[in-house]
Amino acid sequence: MTNLFDRLTNGSVSQRGMTSLTHEQRWGILSTVAASFFLGWAPILGKLAYREGVTPFTLAALRTMVAALLLWVTFALFWRQEIAISWRGLIGCISVGVVNGIGSLFFYTSLARLNASLASLLNTLYPLWVVLFLFASGQPLTRLTLVRLALAMGGVFLLTRVGAGELDWLGVTLMIASAATYGWHLVLGQWVMADVSSRTGALYVLTAMACVVGLARALQTPWQQIVMEPITLAGWFAIVALGLTTALSRLAMFSALRTVGGVETSLGGLLELLVSLVLAFLLLGERLTSVQWLGGGLLVIGMLLMGRDPGMRLARGNEPLEWKREQ
């Protein structure tokens, strides 16, 4: 089992003959596991908030604002010296936050239309988007990548076979778009984290996200109707819990991006998916059909094969040529 774990999480290192992980790599793997665990709660807590009458844009705005507020309070109390950031780092964090903020609007709007299990499975497409974005930036496209792309397309096809008139295609499209923006934010985030500490990056990325989703929530309704819908105590509990898991997941995620890279970090989607499916079964009582489970299995196989795809690994410090010329 240990040998398999090393191959999946450190495939490029093992190919060079190294049999053990460095302390930095182990910390990166632990950060990936932690980020995946907290991210796995997002669709479940989102569904619980929807049951209490919270709307998608309100949920996206409030949970991100809660997360940003928690980080600012924590930094003010314990990490005040890490608040400082360069202008270049700030611009990079804002760009990552804008992309992730738009993606979160797609995610929570889609989640209101799909069950949490199907949404979680469709969201596992984001590692494939990471691969495609790296290909667009000059990384080679291997045969194994094409196999994984075919598996992903087959998996999505089976996941959406639920009978005529039963599937919300807008919800499916929005979740695939959410996975794309999340994948781009991972790639962009690794480039930004080369110049910014992981904790500082998480602070400013979440702050930028809060501004984006807060503005979207404000523009969604006329000014005279900008007052939020009534939210129950249970609804606020779900929002605050979602804000806490969002803050913790971003701290862990950017630590992982800095140490193991974007593709390796996205491998944690397997654990994220497992957490979401188990919680959806236990807390929401959701079930998938046998055909949908087969489609989900194809997506999981594609994610496992990512650990064996050497052409798709973004080496640490590998930035776009335009960025390197400016240094």
Image (cartoon, grey):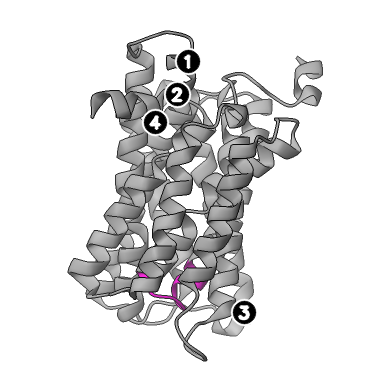
Could you tell me how many numbered marks the image carries? 4
Position of the N terminus by quadrant: top left
**Callout 1: SS:** loop
Which disc number belongs to residue 11?
A: 2
Q: What type is the residue that disc 3 sits on?
A: Trp
Q: Residue furthest top?
A: 17
Which disc number belongs to residue 8?
A: 4
Would you identify the image quadrant in which residue 310 lies? top right
The residue that disc 3 covers is 223
**Callout 4: SS:** helix
Pair 2/3: label in front: 2
Q: What type is the residue that disc 1 sits on?
A: Gln
Residue located 69% across and 36% down the image = 141
Q: What type is the residue that disc 2 sits on?
A: Gly
Q: Nearer the viewer, residue 32 or 236?
A: 32
Is residue 83 something that shows in the picture?
no
